Amino acid sequence: MSSFDKIFLVDDDKIFLMTAKFSLKRVFPEADIQSFSNAEEAINRLIQEKPDLLLLDLNMPVMDGWTFLEQLEEKGSAVTFPIYIVSSSIDPSDINRANEHSHVMGFIEKPLDEQKVKALIEG
């Protein structure tokens, strides 16, 4: 099983951030989990420090997940960590786009629970 010491969560839903953090802590009790409800703030932090894992929502105000990925590339930030889309969207075009994106490792349907966290690190 892989271990993630630093995990970034990017989502505008505070309840999701709280429950996702809880699920992640059950699997990785020692991990430094940083949550961002503002995608711009997350990009600025990514320029300074790299996580071992990034979980990204698609549907956010101001900057959605796709724009976040574009901005990340434009700012020249080397993506050396796995990125997973975590979304409530069941739109096949979102799932296909995620699967085709060069920096996205997979698509996880919300809610994020302990079982999904374990599956993502074992797969």
Image (cartoon, rainbow, N blue to C red):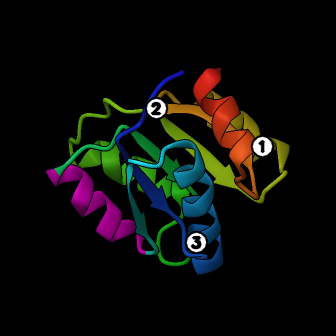
Q: In the rendered view, would you say 20 is above or below 81?
A: below
Q: Which of the image's four quarters has the C terminus?
A: top right
Please identify, in this view, whether the residue under mark 3 or under mark 2 is nearer the observer: 3
Crowd around label 1: few <14 · some 14–19 · many ≥20 (10 Å): few
Q: In the rendered view, would you say 43 is above or below 76?
A: below
Q: Secondary structure at mark 2?
A: loop
Which numbered disc covers residue 65?
none
Tag 3: residue type? Met
Tag 1: residue type? Ser
Q: Pick the residue in front: 46 or 33.
A: 33
Q: Earlier in the sequence, mark 3 or mark 2?
A: 3
Crowd around label 2: few <14 · some 14–19 · many ≥20 (10 Å): some
Q: Which of the image's four quarters has the N terminus?
A: top right
Q: Are marks 2 and 1 in contact (CB under 8 Å)?
A: no
Q: Secondary structure at mark 1?
A: helix
Provide the residue designation for mark 1: 93
Q: In the rendered view, would you say 119 is above or below 75?
A: above
The answer to which image quadrant residue 93 occupies is top right
How far from the left and from the top, in percent, is residue 14?
57, 79
Q: Give the dominant element type of the magenta stretch: helix, strand or loop.
A: helix
How far from the left and from the top, in percent, is residue 29?
47, 49
Provide the residue designation for mark 3: 18
Q: Earlier in the sequence, mark 1 or mark 3?
A: 3
The answer to which image quadrant residue 51 occupies is top left
Q: In the rendered view, would you say 95 is above or below 89?
A: above
Left/right of residue 67 with respect to residue 90 in the rendered view: left
- Residue displayed at 84% across by 51% down: 90
Q: Pick the residue in front: 86 or 96.
A: 86
Provide the residue designation for mark 2: 103
How far from the left and from the top, in percent, is residue 2?
48, 24
Crowd around label 3: few <14 · some 14–19 · many ≥20 (10 Å): few
Q: Which residues are magenta?
A: 38-48
